[in-house]
Amino acid sequence: MNCNGNAQTITKQETNKNKVILIYGSSGCHYCTDLKESLSKKQIAFLFYDIDNDKLALNQMLTKLISAKISTNNLQIPVVDKYGVMYVNNGDFKDFITKITE
């Protein structure tokens, strides 16, 4: 996978040694920043893709959403691939963070 230098890796949590959460978002998105901070505090591994600057990651995200039968209309970021399950930020953000970090 080509990340075009836009991915950021954070320390892996011991219980998820081989698992990494993928976050698709934007560097200027405060929800994206809050999610990355929450994952970092819990030492959960993640890769962040800035879809504003990485068109390959944007296309990858859209393909995954379409495959998961999740609408791409009025899409809000961050979009998360948590171990193969797609999550979108369409509701209460605290609930969204809880789903991703539990």
Image: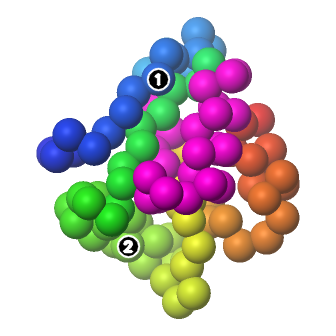
Regarding residue 84, the answer to whether it shows in the image is: no
The single residue placed furthest to the top in the displayed view is: 14
Q: How many numbered marks appear?
A: 2
The percent position of residue 22, horizontal first and vertical second, equals 45, 45
Check disc 2 and report the residue beneath it: 62
Are the residues tagged 2 and 1 within 8 Å (C-beta)?
A: no
Viewer-side residue, 27 vs 73: 27
In this figure, which residue is indicated by the disc labeled 1?
A: 10
Q: Which residues are magenta?
A: 20-42
- Residue at image point 46% right, 71% down: 65
In the rendered image, the vertical position of residue 36 relative to residue 74, given as above or below: above
Disc 2 crowd, CA 10 A, few/some/many (<14, 14-19, 20+)? some
**Quadrant in which the N terminus appears:** top left
Residue 51 occupies quadrant: bottom left
Q: Please state if 2 lies on the left or on the right of 9 as rendered.
A: left
Report the front residue among 62 and 77.
77
* Location of residue 95 in the rendering, given as x and y in whole percent from the top left corner: 84, 54
The structure residue drawn at horizontal position 69% and vertical position 34%, both measured from the top left corner, is 38
Q: Quadrant of the C terminus?
A: top right
Query: Which element carries disc 1, helix, strand or loop?
Result: loop
Which three-letter amino acid code belongs to the residue tagged 2? Answer: Leu
- Would you place residue 45 above or below residue 86 in this image? above
